[in-house]
């Protein structure tokens, strides 16, 4: 344990004012190194940039800078190899690394903290970490969207029932349905990119809360770390966690969309629907029922949505009563953020791997679409085109459906004479619109379910993704 020589048991980074050591339980209770060591590489990255800037403005000599940078590089290697010894009495990732640096290079290591505080240091580390995490998530989200688009093209002609209230409504194509998922994810992608822009602001240089008297150049530090700009206000810079809340907001919306997709996948793989098949590698069996093939991946994604919602509410509640500037409460921001990142990344990876492997059971889908009078609206539209007022057409089709229910016949299975008993305007060409193929083909406009429109929409989505530049 590193101690102040006059007060054994106190942390040397702040122990000078204290007359007795911190209680052992309190030391463990307030320490964050158990989880914030995840920020170690970002902490070293920020420290190297800080030391480089201090040398440029003359606060450190070039020799001191080089010793610090070389020492930090060695520590980074120790961490990456799993050789670094983390210490709870040193409280957090920052003091663990600084203490090790001082141990390696002597008093020069203590000069690294000139012109900064752990308050702006941790805010910088979290932003660096989250920026990296967003870039990784961006790649997985792109991969999932590409897989959906390609599957939609493959299934552009596959007809399935479209539902409202989970009741058969109208025929749609499976490709059209998949592109609806893609639209959800496209909005999520925009939100992620927007969030990244607000993450990419440099807090370092705000020090504890008021800035520093040293002649620092925050624009240099921002450039070295790839930030768009330094934060404008030192009080806000150290206390702001909006970016973490915004990310968990994005994560909650994304997981809500993945959960909706999961629900449909679970339904579609059931014996009652039997619309699709998922490869065995994404499913598990039952310990007692040998016939079972459980869609565990979508079920688990659906379940993980709740934990991300909880993290969003937790972070909002964490921040709601905090006065400016930094408070110890903010130590609680990391675990929900870390878990949200892990959960989002893993769920996206699972879906990006699974979606292209979905196998549609086209015959079962088409058979289901023939049930439930899914072309009833097409018959109403047919009547309207022949001069019947829509409300009258609605009534005529309703009578036809009632007749079909009584006779056990779909509209397309009725004879012309059976249909004409409800309206003399019906002619033999009615069967062109009562087929599933005729129904979906008739909706041939942008946003419609016609196969040609599905292929065109897929190409537009593919082009939009190609224009979406990688984050810088």
Image: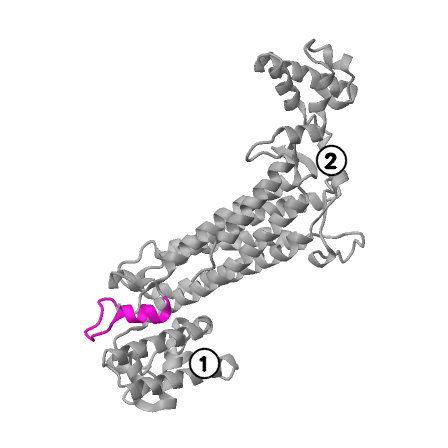
Q: Are marks 2 and 1 in contact (CB under 8 Å)?
A: no
**Residue drawn at x 71%, y 32% as measured from the top left:** 369
Quadrant housing the C terminus: bottom left
Q: Quadrant of residue 52?
A: bottom left
Q: Position of residue 180 (x, y in %)?
A: 57, 41
320 left or right, relative to 399: left
Q: Quadrant of residue 243?
A: bottom left
Residue 76's label in the rendered image is: 1
Q: Which residues are magenta?
A: 209-226
386 part of magenta stretch? no
Q: Secondary structure at mark 2?
A: helix
Residue 238 visible in rendering:
yes
Please name whichever residue, 456 or 251, is drawn nearer the observer in this view of the structure: 456
Quadrant housing the N terminus: bottom left
Question: Relative to 262, is 281 above or below?
Answer: below
Q: Earlier in the sequence, mark 2 or mark 1?
A: 1
The mark tally for this picture is: 2
Question: Relative to 403, is 314 above or below?
Answer: below
**Residue drawn at x 31%, y 81% as measured from the top left:** 112
Q: In front of the other: label 2 or label 1?
A: 2
**Residue drawn at x 44%, y 54% as measured from the top left:** 193
Please name whichever residue, 118 or 171, is drawn nearer the observer in this view of the structure: 171
Q: Secondary structure at mark 1?
A: helix
Q: Quadrant of residue 304?
A: bottom right
Q: Position of residue 406 (x, y in %)?
A: 76, 18
Mark 1: few/some/many CA within 10 Å (<14, 14-19, 20+):
many
Distance from disc 2 to disc 1, alpha carbons, whole Å, reads 59 Å
Q: Which residue is mark 2?
A: 366
224 part of magenta stretch? yes
Q: Residue furthest right?
A: 290
């Amino acid at each position: 344990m590193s101690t102040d020589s006059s007060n054994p048991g106190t942390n040397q980074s702040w122990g000078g004012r204290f007359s007795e050591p911190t209680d052992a339980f309190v030391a463990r209770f307030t320490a964050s190194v158990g989880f914030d060591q995840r920020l170690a590489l970002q902490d070293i990255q920020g420290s190297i940039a800080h030391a480089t800037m201090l040398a440029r403005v003359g606060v450190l000599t070039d020799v001191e800078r080089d010793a610090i940078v070389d020492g930090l590089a060695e520590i980074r290697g120790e961490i990456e190899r799993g050789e670094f010894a983390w210490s709870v009495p040193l409280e957090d990732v920052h003091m663990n690394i600084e203490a090790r640096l001082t141990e390696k290079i002597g008093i020069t290591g203590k000069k690294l903290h000139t012109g900064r505080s752990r308050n702006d240091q941790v805010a910088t580390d979290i932003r660096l970490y989250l920026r990296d995490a967003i870039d990784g998530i961006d790649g997985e989200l792109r991969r999932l969207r590409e897989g959906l688009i390609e599957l939609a093209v493959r299934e552009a002609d596959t007809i399935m029932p479209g539902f409202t209230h989970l009741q058969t409504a109208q025929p749609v194509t499976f490709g059209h349905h998949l592109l609806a998922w893609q639209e959800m994810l496209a909005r999520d992608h925009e939100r992620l990119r927007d969030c990244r822009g607000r993450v990419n602001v440099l807090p370092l240089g705000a020090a504890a809360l008021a800035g520093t008297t040293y002649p620092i150049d925050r624009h240099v530090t921002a450039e070295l770390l790839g930030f768009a700009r330094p934060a404008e206000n030192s009080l806000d810079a150290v206390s702001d966690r909006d970016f973490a809340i915004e990310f968990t907001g994005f994560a909650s919306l994304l997981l809500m969309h993945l959960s909706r997709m999961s629900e449909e996948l679970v339904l579609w793989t059931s014996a009652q629907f039997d619309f699709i098949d998922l490869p065995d590698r994404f499913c598990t069996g039952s310990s007692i029922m040998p016939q079972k093939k459980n869609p565990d991946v979508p079920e688990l994604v659906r379940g993980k949505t709740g934990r991300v919602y909880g993290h969003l509410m937790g972070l909002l509640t964490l921040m709601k009563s905090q006065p400016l500037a930094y408070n110890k409460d903010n130590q609680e921001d990391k675990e929900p953020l870390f878990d949200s990142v892990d959960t989002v990344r893993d769920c996206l990876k699972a879906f990006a791997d699974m979606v292209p492997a979905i196998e549609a059971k086209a015959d079962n889908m088409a058979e289901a679409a023939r049930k439930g009078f899914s072309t009833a609206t097409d018959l109403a539209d047919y009547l309207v085109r022949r001069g019947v007022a829509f409300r009258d057409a609605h009534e005529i089709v309703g009578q036809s459906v009632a007749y079909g229910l009584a006779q056990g016949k779909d509209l397309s299975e009725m004879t012309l004479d059976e249909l004409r008993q409800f309206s003399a305007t019906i002619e033999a060409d009615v069967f062109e619109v009562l087929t599933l193929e005729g129904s979906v083909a008739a909706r041939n406009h942008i946003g419609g379910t016609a196969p040609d429109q599905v292929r065109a929409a897929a190409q537009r989505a593919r082009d939009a993704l190609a224009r979406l530049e990688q984050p810088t």
